Image (spheres, grey):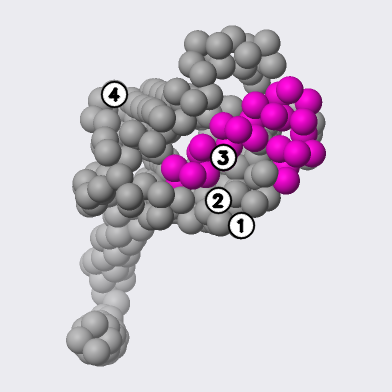
Amino acid sequence: MMSEKQTEINEDKLSLWAQIKEDFSVPKLNDPALDSNVELFFNYPGVWAIVNHRIANRLYNRGWKRLSRVLVGFSSLFTKTDIHPAATIGRRVFIDHAIGVVIGATTIIEDDVLIYQGVTLGGVSLDKGKRHPTIKSNVVVGSGAKVLGNITIGKNSKIGANSVVVCDVPKNSTAVGVPAKIIKRDDRHTKLGHNNLPDINKEMFKYLIERIHILEVALKEEDGIDVSSKDKTLEEEYTKFIDAMNSIKKN
């Protein structure tokens, strides 16, 4: 975890006011829906959550821990984002939509990280030491993802929506699933294309269906077992299921 001395050095490099001005400029680079500066004040709780954290973090590191917690409490009330004042957050970090984001006390987030709504950067133990994740530069964390424990997400990596990450993710990688698995390595694209992520459950079901089919064919050839009547019944049930799903979509 970054020491207070290191934190003070970083603060000297960039004043609080300069950092806040930079935070307000970040949505212009990450959100094409932004049309005017007025929207920053009323429609971007993630920006306000970061700005409030900047102030609370400085108070916390200077010994005003109770005051910093009070400030964070008010910030959580209005932004629906819970960031512990002890968390270390780098420059140009953007929390898009922000609602439901939780960031634990020993979390370290480096520069140019993009976090979507519903993300949890949490712990898995009650130890007093480092128990929350370290998110390296240029990482994208998809909506609803849970990154848990003292693990590291490498530079330029992407975490798929609703994934649960409990192990380190190498740099330039993409992780998806519950628990998350690495599906791409050395992928240097900076944006997370959720529409291009593989459906792990679909692939697994496809594998199981094909495996069952192979076993059925083997049984028929070896023992002469005829399951054609049961196959027909299953096909009818499957057709009914698909028809029911299509009717739900239409309604």
- Say which element carries label 4: loop
Instruction: Give the quadrant of residue 209.
Output: bottom left
Dot 3: element? helix
Looking at the picture, does residue 233 appear above or below residue 178?
below
Question: Mark 1 to mark 3: distance in Å?
Answer: 12 Å
Q: Residues within 10 Å of mark 3 (few under 14, many from 20)?
A: many
Q: What residue is drawn where x is 60% and y is 42%?
A: 83
Q: Nearer the viewer, mark 4 or mark 3?
A: 3
The label nearer to you, 3 versus 2, is 3
Q: Quadrant of residue 223?
A: bottom left
Q: Residues within 10 Å of mark 4 (few under 14, many from 20)?
A: few
Residue 60 in the magenta stretch? The answer is yes
Is residue 58 rendered to the left or right of residue 166? Answer: right
* Mark 3 vs 2, N-terminal side: 3
Earlier residue among tags 4 and 2: 2
Q: Residues under labels 3 and 2: Cα distance? A: 11 Å
Q: Give the left or right position of residue 66, taking residue 130 as reference.
A: right
Report the front residue among 104 and 168: 104
> Which quadrant: the N terminus?
top right
Do the CB atoms of the residues marked 3 and 2 lie less than 8 Å apart? no
Badges 1 and 3: C-beta atoms under 8 Å apart? no
Q: Is residue 53 visible?
A: yes
Q: Which mark is residue 77?
A: 1
User: What amino acid is at disc 4?
Assistant: Asp
Q: Nearer the viewer, mark 4 or mark 1?
A: 1
Residue 186 circle label: 4
